[in-house]
Structures are given as structure tokens and as C-alpha cells.
Amino acid sequence: MNPSRILSLLAFIFLLGYTAILYVSNSGGVKLLNAIRDIKPGFDRTQVEEVMGEQPNVFDAVSPPAWNEKLAGVRESGQYWHYFMGFPPRNLVIYVNTDGKVVFATWDPT
């Protein structure tokens, strides 16, 4: 096989791989931003699950994991709902009060 064809093929494979990595990277960020935009204060668990398409990991807001405590603090009541999102990895964190309503949503890189 001709050396110029081999170089062309390698360049094509490199560009294809690079494009795929950029697509996956951007789709994770877009998904996160869409989720934060779409999850409104006052939503209940069912509405959040409709937006996210899955159930959250739930932690008590009185004793959250250490990384969550640094991000969103400790609350007197309620729950933190976590969703692991895409590449690069991120956590969507939603604080829900005792009435089961969303108060705020934020995110943290993992």
C-alpha cells in the first residue's frame, strides 16, 4: 500500500476519533445544562424523573456525603437527589424540601 494512502487513512481515523470524543464530551454538558434548565423549583419527584428518565440516588440533607456538604451544605431537613451525568463526569444535585418539592438544582464535577 502507498505510504501517502496510509498517512491519509491514519489522519482520517484520528479526525473521526477526535470528532467522536468532542461529540460525547459536548453531549454530556448539554444534557446537564438542559436538566438544570428544565427542573424547576416546585417540581415533585415524578416530574424530575420524567425530565431525567431515571430515579435519583437519594441522600438525607442532614448528613450528606462530604463532597455534597462542601457543594450545597447541610440542611435541617429534606433530601439531596443525585444524578451522575455523562462525560466528562458530573453530578447533578437537587435539593428537595420536606414537602417533596425541588428548591434548587446545581452540579459538581466528579
Image: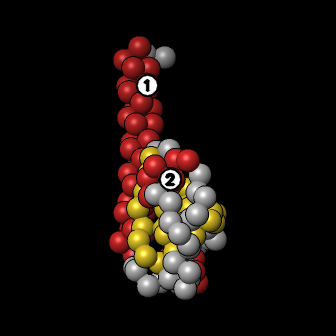
Describe residue 95's horizontal placement relative to residue 63 as left or right.
left
Q: Can residue 50 be seen in this view?
A: no
Rendered position, 1 above or below 56: above
Q: Residue at x 45, y 32 (%)?
A: 13
Secondary structure of the residue carrying tag 2 is helix
Q: In which quarter of the image is residue 2?
A: top left
Residue 14 versus residue 55 in the image, above or below? above
Q: In which quarter of the image is residue 61?
A: bottom right
- Foreground residue, 29 or 97? 97
Please state the horizontal and vertical placement of residue 87, each as a whole percent of the image: 48, 47
- Check the image and report above or below for 1 versus 74: above
Cα distance in 3D space between marks 1 and 2? 47 Å
In the picture, measured across the screen, residue 61 lies left or right of residue 7, that is right
Label 1: how many Cα within 10 Å (few below 14, some 14–19, many 20+): few
Dot 1 or dot 2: first in sequence order is 1
Which residue is depicted at the point 44% across and 20% down? 6
Q: What element carries label 1?
A: helix
Amino acid found under the numbered disc labelled 2: Glu
Query: Residue under circle 2?
Result: 69
Query: Residue 76: x and y, percent?
Result: 53, 69
Q: Position of residue 68 (x, y in %)?
A: 51, 53
Image coordinates of residue 43 in percent, x first then y, are: 47, 83
Closest to the observer: 39 or 71? Answer: 71
Query: Which residue is drawn at the image coordinates 43% and 25% (left, top)?
Result: 10
Q: In the rendered structure, which amino acid carries the disc numbered 1?
A: Leu
Residue at point 42% right, 67% down? Answer: 105
Q: Check disc 1 and report the residue beneath it.
A: 10
